[in-house]
Amino acid sequence: MKPALLVIGPGRSGSSALTAVLALRGASLPATLLPPGHGNPQGHFEPQHLVELNDEILAAHGIGYWDPIAIPLAWFKGAEAGTYTSRIAETIIAEYGSRPLPIIKDPRLCRVAPLYLAALRQLGLAPHAVIPLRHPAAAASSLSARDGTPPETAELLQIHELLGAERHSAALPRAWSRYDDLLSDWRSTTSGIAATLNLSWPIPPEEAAGPIRAFLTPSLRHHTKGAPAGPLAEHLFAATAHGEATIRATFEAARFVLDEHDRLLAPWQSTLRARLEPHAVAQADERAARETEILNFRTDLARSAREREALHAALAQYEAEIARREADIASLRSSTSWRVTAPLRVLATFLERVDIRDSGSG
């Protein structure tokens, strides 16, 4: 089976830079990329249509990307998951065709990866995982700065995504890649990934060196410091510096605690949502009413603007007519006939005054 790469790791972990560099070494990006945005001016390097599909999958579970909640593993064995797997496979075909070494990157893979593993295998592709790593304090700080996420929520999301990435890639050939290592020595980083995954890059380093150096600008080194990460995030990050046995044991222990915490917390969260729903509905109704008022105001404003423009146009026409008539009068008064008949006009005025006086005396 031909290999396919899944860049599966937390957001703001340097996954965009890693994906771009691997693409410059010859991995195939999708036909339709998510446009650059705030926080990623050089690009996200994510397949836009698959990202949209991933958001749809999360929404089907009542969550969004910023909710640090995992999808229950049992769901991936159901009919609905099978439908999504087929749609993912169709989108992969449309976006990547038969190009070699397709690379799919999206932090949402930390939660929906089982669907992609099934879809890639249906297409005769062997999934390989590359897990980007960044110090949790820097990653959480970057996420908070970009999205306004509270630091604790950003850290919790990082932990959940990292645990999901490890869980869903455990049965795959996988390589762990640190962001700082990529920025300081991309050659060793890409060579190490290839060696770990037992694959070769289509583009040799000598050919890729220029474009990669141009891409890995100093501006990529931002949010190097932030609020200190908590002990759990630090513990998980430290474990990734050791072998697979340490990684698996450490992550499994942490995942057991968080899974149990989520299970116990779920009923209370449901109760809280039900309690807050009337208030949320009232707020939504109030917001809709205000939006309607704003829309009506804008409609009235647009109508007034059109009426003002019509009045200005009419005034311009009147002023043009006055100017034309004044020009005609000026032309008449400068004519020879006007000068010749001037005595007659004086006489006519005199006779008119005499007639008025005589009429008054009679």
Image (tube, rainbow, N blue to C red):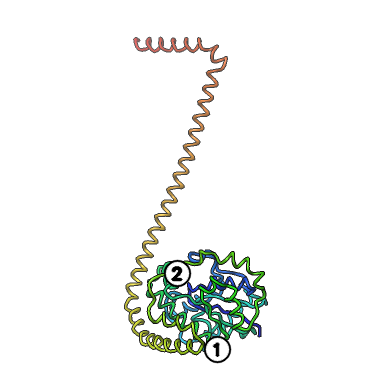
For image coordinates 44% across by 72% down, the residue present is: 138
Q: Residue 215, position in %: x, y? A: 57, 66
Q: Residue 31, position in %: x, y? A: 62, 70
For image coordinates 55% across by 68% down, the residue present is: 34
Tag shown at residue 362: none
Q: Nearer the N terminus, badge 1 or badge 2?
A: 1
Q: Quadrant of the N terminus?
A: bottom right
For image coordinates 54% across by 15% down, the residue present is: 338
Q: Give the distance between the C-alpha atoms of the residues marked 1 and 2, in whole angstroms.
A: 32 Å
Can I make out residue 1 in this image? Answer: yes
Q: Secondary structure at mark 1?
A: loop
For image coordinates 51% across by 12% down, the residue present is: 342
Tag shown at residue 224: 2
Looking at numbered disc 1 in the image, what kind of residue is underneath it? Ala
Q: In which quadrant of the rendered view does residue 32 lie?
A: bottom right
Neighbours of disc 2 within 10 Å: few (<14), some (14-19), many (20+): few
Q: Is residue 265 left or right of 49 when viewed as pictured?
A: left
Looking at numbered disc 2 in the image, what kind of residue is underneath it? Thr
Q: Residue 77, position in %: x, y? A: 52, 89
Query: Relative to the observer, which residue lies in front, 352 or 325?
Result: 325
Q: Which residue is mark 1?
A: 171
Q: Is residue 273 left or right of 58 when viewed as pictured?
A: left
Neighbours of disc 1 within 10 Å: few (<14), some (14-19), many (20+): few
Above or below for 89 versus 150:
below
Q: Is residue 148 left or right of 88 when viewed as pictured?
A: left
Q: In which quadrant of the rendered view does residue 185 lie?
A: bottom right
Query: Relative to the observer, which residue lies in front, 335 or 165?
Result: 165
